[in-house]
């Protein structure tokens, strides 16, 4: 034991430098985030539980109680084994409501700032002995290595370095919930170092001091028996009480709570820790008896205290350095985290409660500064406690005093999770009673050296001979729990507490009310909040909450505003604790009071149920399955459906309605009826105002045109727990309306068709007369002009006859009535003829026509009907063209077909109309100018010719216009008879 | 959730029976590592339950 002070200091400083470099590497991003956020890092960081007690205290306990030392490890392993039912619900709560400490959790659940303050004070009192224990092991280790006269000053130097380190890397973010990758990484590294050091020391004990496991077993069965004579195994009751204490420590100790919940990466990592942390602790626990037995074999236990037997394994500097570094790693990690956790608790529950930050300029920096000052104070407070009190006690006494103190919060924590009926008065009374017993029984004797004052209840006199820690634990926890239960049952629970109990309880779902806020949009939150937080912080907090929720600042849905308010409260809770956060939102973002009795926010309740699905079992799971099934029925109903609460807030907007309206349900659910986008607000308002009749075929202008909607409604009467409201069905009757209109149109056309035969007969006679007269005229004159006119009159009368004939044919089912067969026809000639006729019309005189069709090849067809096709296409092209436009008729062979195109430069066709152009009555022309029969007729004629037709609009290479492409056969089809009989005959 | 009940049972049973762990401290003929082997088996059991829970949730 002759190491120099300088060497020890250099050793410690090197370790802290390594930590510093690790922190720097993480902060600068030199280490991949996949590594720093790996679940193993989180598990190793949880290893901070293994404080100096695990390195030195366990040796001391093992030398007294044998395997009793395992309680320290198995207690926390049991707590993590119950992670799914115990830790995950707490993690969910702390994450949802941004609660970063036990005091936050209690203040949130029991709706009192003073509860938070009480928990903070108790934690401070309980943790001081634990902090002192850390410093004491540091001082003792330095003394053992150097024999220095004043190890306390060296311990102070190390404490100062640790405090600086914690202030620099632990409190850089004012928000405790900001992810501390750096902190996790350095705590994980310290866990690796202490584990590696302990395993190496264990290996030295097993293979250097002993000659392997067999030699150890021989020694244990022989000479070792004498050394174990002093070991008093704890009886079952003591053992179970120890287990309970360490189980509670895993949940309640401020630093463990901080690392488990405030720094957790995800639920998955927490669940993974349920087996990986016990594995880590197992590896850490195995070397303890090995080192103890090796020390006993070497006789070191007679020279140095059993807690520090690792230093006696060898005189080698490096073996002692390992023992020192293992202790320093455990001590530094624990002190850093305790300081961080306690500083946050003191800040949120003592300082900010006493002096709320009223529009403090530069709030974030002010909070950071306060935090850093508190970190230094806590660590130096721990050193002071060690210097004045700790030096007079062994590690076990100090440790047990701390653990029994923190265990007083266990009844409150369990009630918080599993007993919604628990109230603040019961919790506070029980906690104070239990804490007083602990203070008198363990803490004050620690401070004063006087014997413990333990009040043993009548009937439990047999406890008088038991150790103080055991009696105090039993009595304090029993009195605490009983008082808690009795007072809670006997006193009134406030509504606020009930709501918080639902939020915290494992088996209950929070059921907030649908209260309207005074602010109308998220943007309006900023001004009132600025009065409490200052403009800059208010803007940032509102923007952050909006980003978290993915909401727009102008979203005015009451549901969205309520969620925004909750989110801001949760975020402020992470910054300043739940008490101050609640005060701020209650004061500056108040609800609008008066009006209707608020009802449950069932949309929110349902969203919570969706999240809780994996937690449901048995009947609840079956019922949830049914709920989901019924909800799916409503959501997937092929008819539009929406539902309103009694306060006109929209509760449901199903998929069919979303498709019809083009409005996604998530963007409108939670809005008030009058806040819905046009025309829905007004339309639904009309239906709701009219108490009796449905609205039939209401013309509504939507994005894809006019729709005809029929709306039905049904009242949902409120009955006890069943909520009231209105459900509305919206049927789209547009197709039916269209069909009705078409039916009327078709009926009119049918009557025209019936008239057509008569008209044809009546027109036929005068036309025949005109035709005869025109023919006679040709014989009566040689004037070429008159002859041409007569010829044209004859052609036109023929055309009139054919048109009338076609009209009758179409009216009779679209079948042609011509008896002519198919013959080779020149498309160029057909086009010329059509152009000739079409130029007779007065309209479109200024449109230029170009016939580029070659004379060959000819197509197989009916000249008259092909001419009818061409006239229809050309007249359509003319009507679509602007004055001065060009219309080009072209043709080119494509295999056994001839492709004929009619191209214009007109306004083109809308895509939706284009798909229906070959259907009867589809027209792009103004009413009265088109019948919608032309192109169906063309289609029908081309089909008769075994050809096909396509429309390109705009044609390739043109910005506008339309091209009609026809493909007609140039060869006779198999089996086609030139004198094919007319099917009408 | 049924897995959670098994865990609860395991922890409660372990709590009641855990005093048996201590009986082997330097008793002649009892392997010194016995408590650690039992502990290791419990960890393996927890790992298996955790895998089962993951499968249940998917």
Image (tube, rainbow, N blue to C red):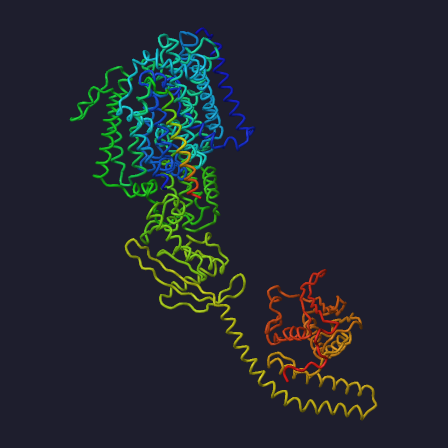
Residue A923 higher or lower than A233, as above or below: below
Q: Is residue A475 left or right of residue A55?
A: left
Report x, y in % for residue A202.
43, 17
Q: Nearer the viewer, residue A736 or A814?
A: A814
What quarter of the picture does the C terminus of chain A occupy? bottom right
What quarter of the picture does the N terminus of chain A occupy? top left
Residue A159 at least partly seen: no
Give the quadrant of residue A54. top left
Q: Nearer the viewer, residue A231 or A554?
A: A231
Report x, y in % for residue A121.
32, 27
Q: Is residue A728 left or right of residue A866?
A: left
Report x, y in % for residue A260.
40, 31
Question: Residue at 34% of width from left, 42% of height from top?
Answer: A503
Residue A859 at least partly seen: yes
Q: Nearer the viewer, residue B7 or A554?
A: B7
Residue A646 higher or lower than A290, as above or below: below
Return the residue found at the far left: A458
């Amino acid at each position: 034991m002759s190491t120099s002070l300088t060497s020890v200091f250099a050793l410690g400083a090197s370790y802290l430098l390594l930590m510093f470099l690790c922190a720097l590497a993480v902060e600068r991003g030199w280490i991949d985030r996949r590594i720093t956020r790996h679940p193993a890092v989180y598990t190793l960081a949880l290893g901070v539980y293994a404080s100096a007690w695990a390195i030195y205290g366990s040796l001391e306990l093992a030398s007294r109680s044998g395997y009793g030392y395992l309680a320290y490890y198995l207690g926390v392993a049991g707590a993590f084994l119950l992670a799914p039912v115990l830790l995950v619900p707490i993690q969910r709560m702390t994450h949802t409501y941004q609660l970063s400490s036990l005091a936050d959790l209690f203040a949130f659940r029991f709706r009192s700032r003073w509860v938070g303050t009480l928990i903070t004070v108790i934690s401070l009192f309980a943790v001081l002995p634990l902090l002192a224990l850390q410093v004491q092991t540091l001082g003792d280790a330095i003394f053992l290595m150097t024999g220095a006269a004043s190890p306390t000053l060296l311990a102070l130097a190390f404490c100062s370095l640790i405090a600086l380190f914690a202030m620099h890397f632990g409190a850089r973010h004012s928000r405790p919930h900001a992810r501390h990758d750096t902190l996790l990484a350095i705590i994980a590294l310290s866990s690796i170092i202490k584990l590696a050091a302990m395993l190496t020391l264990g290996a030295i004990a097993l293979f250097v001091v002993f000659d392997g496991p067999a030699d150890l077993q021989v020694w244990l069965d022989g000479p070792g028996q004498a050394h174990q004579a002093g070991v008093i195994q704890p009886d079952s009751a003591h053992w179970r009480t120890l287990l309970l204490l360490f189980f509670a420590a895993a949940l309640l100790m401020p630093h463990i709570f901080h690392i488990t919940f405030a720094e957790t990466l995800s639920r998955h990592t927490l669940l993974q820790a349920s087996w990986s942390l016990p594995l880590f602790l197992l590896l850490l626990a195995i070397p303890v008896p090995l080192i103890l037995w090796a020390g006993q074999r070497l006789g070191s236990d007679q020279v140095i205290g059993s807690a520090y037997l690792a230093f006696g394994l060898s005189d080698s500097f490096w073996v002692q350095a390992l023992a020192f570094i293992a202790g320093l790693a455990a001590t530094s990690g624990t002190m850093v985290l305790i300081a961080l956790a306690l500083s946050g608790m003191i800040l949120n529950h003592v300082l900010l409660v006493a002096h709320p930050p009223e529009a403090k300029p530069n709030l974030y920096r002010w909070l950071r500064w306060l935090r850093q000052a508190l970190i230094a104070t806590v660590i130096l407070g721990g050193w002071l406690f060690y210097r004045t009190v700790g030096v007079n006690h062994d590690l076990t006494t100090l440790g047990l005093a701390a653990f029994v103190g923190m265990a007083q919060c266990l009844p409150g924590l369990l009630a918080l999770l599993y007993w919604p009926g628990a109230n603040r008065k019961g919790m506070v009374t029980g906690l104070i009673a239990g804490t007083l017993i602990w203070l008198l029984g363990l803490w004050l004797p620690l401070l004063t050296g006087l014997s413990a004052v333990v009040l043993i209840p009548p009937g439990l006199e047999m406890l008088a001979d038991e150790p103080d820690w055991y009696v105090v634990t039993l009595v304090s926890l029993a009195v605490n729990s009983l008082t808690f239960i009795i007072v809670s049952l006997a006193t009134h629970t406030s509504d606020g507490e009930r709501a918080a109990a639902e939020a915290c309880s494992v088996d209950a779902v929070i059921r907030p009310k649908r209260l309207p806020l005074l602010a109308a949009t998220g943007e309006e939150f900023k001004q009132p909040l600025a009065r409490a937080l200052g403009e800059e912080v208010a803007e940032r907090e509102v923007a952050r909450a909006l980003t978290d929720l993915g909401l727009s600042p102008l979203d005015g849905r009451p549901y969205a505003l309520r969620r925004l308010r909750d989110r801001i409260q949760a975020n402020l809770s992470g910054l300043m604790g739940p008490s101050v956060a609640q005060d701020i939102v209650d004061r500056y973002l108040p609800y609008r009071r008066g009006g209707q009795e608020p009802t449950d926010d069932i949309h929110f309740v349902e969203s919570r149920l969706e999240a809780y699905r994996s937690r449901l079992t048995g009947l609840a799971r079956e019922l949830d399955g049914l709920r989901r099934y019924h909800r799916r029925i409503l959501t997937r109903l092929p008819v539009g459906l929406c539902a309103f609460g009694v306060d006109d807030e929209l509760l449901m907007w199903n998929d069919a309605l979303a498709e019809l309206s083009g409005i996604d349900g998530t963007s409108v659910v939670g809005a008030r009826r009058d806040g819905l986008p046009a025309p829905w607000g007004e339309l639904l308002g009309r239906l709701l105002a009219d108490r009796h009749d449905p609205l039939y075929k209401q013309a509504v202008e939507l994005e894809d045109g006019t729709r005809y909607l029929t709306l039905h409604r049904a009242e949902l009467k409120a009955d006890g727990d069943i909520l009231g409201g209105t459900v509305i069905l919206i049927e789209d009757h547009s197709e039916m309306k269209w069909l009705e209109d078409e039916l009327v149109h078709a009926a009119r056309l049918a009557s025209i068709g019936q008239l057509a035969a008569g008209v044809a007969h009546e027109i036929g006679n005068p036309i025949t007369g005109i035709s005869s007269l025109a023919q006679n005229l040709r014989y009566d004159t040689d004037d070429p002009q008159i002859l041409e006119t007569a010829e044209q009159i004859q052609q036109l009368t023929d055309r009139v006859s054919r048109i009338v004939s076609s009209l009758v044919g179409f009216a009779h089912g679209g079948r042609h009535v011509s008896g002519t067969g198919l013959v080779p026809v020149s498309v160029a000639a057909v086009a010329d003829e059509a152009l000739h006729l079409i130029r007779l019309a007065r309209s479109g005189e200024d449109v230029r026509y170009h016939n580029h069709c070659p004379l060959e090849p000819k197509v197989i067809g009916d000249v008259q009907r092909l001419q009818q096709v061409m006239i229809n296409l050309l007249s359509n092209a003319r009507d679509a063209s602007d004055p001065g436009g060009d219309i080009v008729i072209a043709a080119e062979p494509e295999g056994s077909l001839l492709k004929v195109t009619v191209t214009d430069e007109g306004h083109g066709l809308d895509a939706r109309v284009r798909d229906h152009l070959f259907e009867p009555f589809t027209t792009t022309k103004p009413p009265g100018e088109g019948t919608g029969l032309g192109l169906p007729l063309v289609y029908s004629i081309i089909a008769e010719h075994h050809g096909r037709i396509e429309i390109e609009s705009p044609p390739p290479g043109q910005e506008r216009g339309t091209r009609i492409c026809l493909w007609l056969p140039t060869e006779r089809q198999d089996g086609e008879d030139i004198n094919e009989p007319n099917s009408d005959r | 959730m049924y897995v959670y009940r098994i865990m609860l049972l395991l922890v409660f049973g372990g709590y009641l029976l855990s005093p048996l762990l201590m009986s082997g401290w330097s008793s002649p003929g009892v392997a010194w590592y016995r408590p650690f082997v039992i502990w290791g088996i419990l960890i393996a059991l927890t790992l298996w339950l955790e895998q089962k829970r993951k499968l249940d949730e998917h």
